[in-house]
Image (cartoon, rainbow, N blue to C red):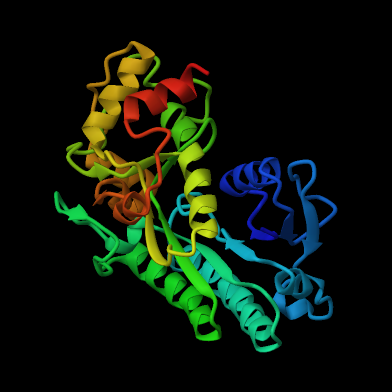
Amino acid sequence: MNIVIVGATGMIGGAISAAALQSGHPVTALVRDSSRSTLPTGVNRTRMPDRDEGGDDAWKHSIRNADVVINLAGEPIGAARWNPEVKERLVQSRVTTTRRIVDALLEAAAAGSRPLTLVNASAVGYYGDCGDEIIIESRGAGVCFLADLCRKWEEEAMRASAGGVRVLVMRLGLVLAESGVLQKMLYPLPVHLSPFKLGLGGPMGSGRQWMPWVHIDDVVGLFLFAAANPDAHGPINVTAPNPVTNAEFAYELGHVLQRPAVVPIPAFLLRAVVGEFAGALLSGQRAIPAVPQQLGYQFKYAHLLEALKQLIHR
């Protein structure tokens, strides 16, 4: 497969790029600044200018020559305290970029070029807060900011199907890797001290909210598996088959670190520190990967304990 990736400089994009190259697939990254972007050795890079710059259409030629386009574009959800301006940036960084990619795909399809598949990122936040309900891909969208953001993002991606493009929307759970969310949980303070390693970690709020986690190796595996499988289409939950509650997650993390993890973070404190984003941390989805399981994907890390051991003790 000739693969084009938008967002290849991020944690997930870099991991997918490296794995695709190792499997013999040519990879081209569409980047804002081709001179400064850090990418795995062997990845081609093409500059994708901002819309208002105009001019350079080399990125569109890359899409025309692709078999698969993987779109991971979007500002990090929890990087800044939410306010109307930040929330608008979160939406536009996803929707506007996806619109440009889909427009290029539709142009290529109309010209008889070969882009066949769009693999577009989304998130289990699409479902909103679902309590203890078991969530599979057929469930509708929830009612909250993140659900609305994901719905708009997915709707933009699905436009490509009008041109005969196979579209997959990958609803990511909490991605566990050496960097990213796991490190933020271990080191939430501006100093290099870990409450969990000191035996002061614990659940957030009541701890009853579900955490649909997934190991980075299975994120990579699922993206490439879905891209190569013509029977895969539409929404796919990129989550491990055994979600846990937040309290269970804290317990397992403490177990791996050989420390107790029973000191809760009160909900009011979370709200004071991160504002509206606390609502996303205190709610959850008991999402399971029904579609990948039906298609025969074999998870490398189906259980949280083995995933945490691999990441923390590697």
- Give the residue at x 27% y 38%: 242
Q: Quadrant of residue 170?
A: bottom left
Q: In which quarter of the image is residue 87?
A: bottom left
Count the labels in the image: 0
Q: Is residue 263 above or below residue 77?
A: above
Indicate left or right for 231 with 281 as reference: right
The location of residue 216, given as percent across then percent down, is 49, 39
The location of residue 187, given as percent across then percent down, is 47, 28
The location of residue 175, given as percent across then percent down, is 44, 42
In this view of the protein, which residue sits in the foreground, 263 or 71? 71
Residue that sits furthest to the top in the current view: 258
In this view of the protein, which residue sits in the foreground, 105 or 143? 105
Residue that sits furthest to the left in the current view: 132
Image quadrant in which the N terminus is located: bottom right
In this view of the protein, which residue sits in the foreground, 54 or 133? 133
Q: In this rendering, does residue 194 appear at all?
A: no
Q: Is residue 280 above or below residue 241?
A: below
- Give the residue at x 69% y 40%: 22
- Give the residue at x 55% y 84%: 163
Indicate left or right for 129 with 229 as reference: left
- Give the residue at x 85% y 53%: 35
Indicate left or right for 64 with 7 as reference: right
Q: In this view, does 216 lie above or below 194?
A: below
Q: Quadrant of residue 236?
A: bottom left
The location of residue 24, given as percent across then percent down, is 71, 46
